[in-house]
Image: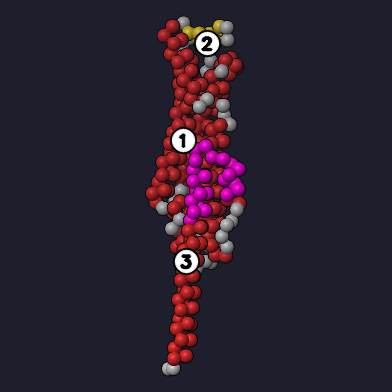
Amino acid sequence: MNGKTKIVLNILIMILIGIIIFLILRNFLIDKQLKDEINETYNLIIMDNYNYKDVYEKIDNIVTKEGYAIVEDSAKDYLLDYFLEVLNLDETYEKVDIKNMISIENIKNDGKEFKTTKQTLRDLKENIENIKNEIISNLSKEKMMSYINDKNLDDSYIKLYESLDFIKDKNIEKRKAQIEDKVNLYLSKINKVEEVIDLLIKNSWSIENEQVKFNDEKLNIEYNEMVNSIYEETNN
């Protein structure tokens, strides 16, 4: 092998090495871009005070290409479905104004047994529990992987999807705990309203000057403290 051939061969080897390094760096940077994008989306949807506009804009904007775009879109599809489930949970609770159940108007209209109020609160609790169970059921690795398994992608893309933060066991458990805490807070507020209704059912009272008055002053104090607590909690 003469000197000129060696030079050409060395140049070709250097070019090949350069191409390999370029592809490795390119894939690393795209992997990072994808992971950062999904993490940003994930962090938006798990906020207690989420912003609808920010969430939908983030989910609608696909920033990668080719197989990476399919991974990104699949991850965002799952995160959107999760977000909509949480949204449904919040809206289900919020569409019933529970403090209205102890308003003077409702107390006057519902009768001493409060049948309509009690049924409304029972239905609300049941609906919240059902939605919670559905969300918890879908917070599983199997469910998350179902969004990518039918895309006919190379294993490298599947592994990339599986490495995303939202699918890690510790984050799945955090989300389950977050949902449990949210539901427990909602149920606690509903239970307090039920306690007020039970107090009214079990005792003698009348309405004077648009206020509930018990024959026993201790009950008046207890009732007012309970009602004030509910109004404070539901306004926060």
Q: Earlier in the sequence, mark 3 or mark 1?
A: 3
Quadrant including the N terminus: bottom left
Quarter residue 176 falls in: top left
Tell me which amino acid carries mark 3: Leu
Would you say residue 163 is visible in this rendering?
yes
Tell me which amino acid carries mark 2: Val
Where residue 52 appears, as percent x and y from the top left, is 59, 41
Label 1 sits on residue: 183
Q: Principal SS element in the magenta part?
A: helix
Quarter residue 180 falls in: top left
Where residue 219 appears, as percent x and y from the top left, is 43, 10
Q: Is residue 225 above or below residue 21?
A: above
Q: Residues within 10 Å of mark 3 (few under 14, many from 20)?
A: few
Q: Residue at x 57, y 49 (%)?
A: 58
Q: Left or right: where does residue 136 sit relative to residue 92?
A: left
In magenta, the rendered stretch is: 34-58
